[in-house]
Structures are given as C-alpha cells and as structure tokens.
Image (tube, rainbow, N blue to C red):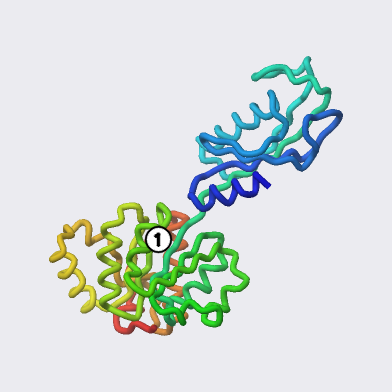
Amino acid sequence: MEWLKAVQRLREQRVPGVLVTLTSVRGHSPREAGAKMVVSADRTWATVGGGNLEAVAIERARAMLADDVSVPETLKVSLSDKAPYQHGVQCCGGEVELLLEPLPVVPSVAIFGMGHVGVELARILARHDLELHLVDSRAAQLSAAHLRGLDDAVAGIHVHQVPVLPELVMGGLPEGTHVLIMTHDHAEDAALCDASLRASHLASIGLIGSSAKWSRFRAKLADEGHAPEAIARITTPIGLPDLGGKEPATIAVSVAARLLQLFTGTSTTAVTTSSTTKKEPR
C-alpha cells in the first residue's frame, strides 16, 4: 500500500505529515470509504478522490502542519455543483467525511553500549513510540537472547553491531537523535564523545561515568581541538538529580525519566544525578 509505505518513510526520515482517511460516503464519491492518502509539506502519496475534494484535504492538512496541530480533525466535503468550492466543481452528488490525523516526528534515541544499564534502559524506552538505535561492538550484547525483553517493543528497534569503530554510526543517526554513551570500554566512550561533538545534528549527548572519568575526557577533548562550549554539549552524569541509587534498573529509570522530560519539554531540573557518579554498571 502506497500510503503505508509513505507513513513509514516519513517516520524514518523524521518528517511530519498528515494521514487523510475517507471515513464515510453518502451518495456518490470518486473513492469508497477507507481510501487513504498521506500529505507532507511538499508531497502527497495515494489519493482520496482527486479534484476539489482532495485539494481541500491537502490544503487543510498543510495548514495543520504549518500550525503544528497535534489533534485529529474531521472535514466534510459536499460533491455537488451547488456546493461552495475552492478548487473546481466536483458534481458526483454525494457528501464525504474525512479524518485528518497528524503524523508527528517521534523521538529518536541511540544507546551506545548494551551492558547492564543499556539493556535496562532499552527495555523502558521500547515501551514508548520512538525510534531506538542500539549500538555495541560486541555481537553477544546484541543477540536475540540478550535483547529478548524487546520482543514486544512499541518502539522501532534498530540494531547496529559494529565490531570496529562504532563511532562511525554517529553520523548516520537521524536528525535530532538523543545519544547516550555507556559502553564497556572507556577508550570507546572517549572516541564516541569526540564523534558526537563532530556531529552537529544530534539533539543531546549524555555520558555515563564518574567525575574523575569526565575530568580526563574533558582534557582529552580539549586536546583534540574541541572548544569549551562544544564540550559543554555533553551531559555527565546523566539522569534525574534527585533519584539516587546504583542498581542498573534504577539508573535506567532515572535516565529514561530525564529523556521523557526532554521529549515533552517539561524539564525544570538540572540534568545530572549522583546515581552514576561512583559506579558504572555494565
């Protein structure tokens, strides 16, 4: 189905759109109830009947996109030569109702390191409507057995097993991805921090670790030519400041809660937490 492929394409490309469905028909109509089309700011896919009917739907859908409307709308269109029209007469004789459903850009998160904390965090985030990228240089950490808790995920799951130079994944992540660096290897973490600062398309960058680790990383990043304001893009430690605890599941809850604040724009707290300053569970 063309419209279904279009929905998936827009989601993958992180482009908003509107799904238009012909929900009811009275009398004659160019298309039957159930016909669908997808509208973006500059393209359409499939058809709900053409002519004035379709032009009105496209016009309204694009107005919804321009106004960032998030609530579905219904639209009635009369197919009569006596009815008002904006884009030409369409005199099939019927009346149709359309449902216009916004297709928002869902959040994108990349977890580098599927150790103890990474797996627990993936389990939580997988229950949300987002795109979740899981990256590890160790094949076993991305095996079906290790990720069995994600079998019924709501999120779109993307597994990246990169034996060498996992930082190469960074440049291919979708625009606006939130990156979390928590691998088993501090040298790998350092390389990922460097790569993340060279990728201007990321939304946020988080690093798990202690203050001593960050002090070494900060000096290394400065030596590699990163300006202080660029280095400040990296948040460490990560999570909510008032949720302590060192268990992987507790840290994962803290980090997931902070991400949800970022997604909804409701955060009023700082981004650091003591839960990851002393121990880095893998």
Viewer-nearest residue: 282 or 191: 191
Name the outermost residue toward the right: 27
- x, y (%) of residue 141? 46, 80
Relative horizontal placement of residue 124, taking residue 234 as reference (left or right): right
Q: Is residue 168 above or below residue 46?
A: below
Q: Which residue is painted at 54% across and 47% down in the image?
A: 10
Residue 74: image quadrant is: top right
Name the outermost residue toward the top: 82
- x, y (%) of residue 133? 46, 65
Viewer-nearest residue: 208 or 264: 208
Name the outermost residue toward the left: 223
Relative horizontal placement of residue 222, taking residue 157 as reference (left or right): left
Q: Which residue is painted at 50% across and 45% down in the image?
A: 15
Q: Which residue is painted at 34% across and 73% down in the image?
A: 164
Q: Residues within 10 Å of mark 1 (few under 14, many from 20)?
A: many
- Name the residue type under label 1: His
Relative horizontal placement of residue 187, taking residue 260 as reference (left or right): left
Residue 279: image quadrant is: bottom left
- x, y (%) of residue 255? 42, 70
Quadrant of the rendering where the C terminus is positioned: bottom left
Q: Is residue 166 above or below residue 268?
A: below
Viewer-nearest residue: 268 or 182: 182
Viewer-nearest residue: 233 or 28: 28
Q: Secondary structure at mark 1?
A: strand
Residue 17: image quadrant is: top right
Residue at label 1? 178
Q: Is residue 52 above or below residue 97?
A: above
Relative horizontal placement of residue 13, taking residue 278 as reference (left or right): right
State how many labels appear.
1
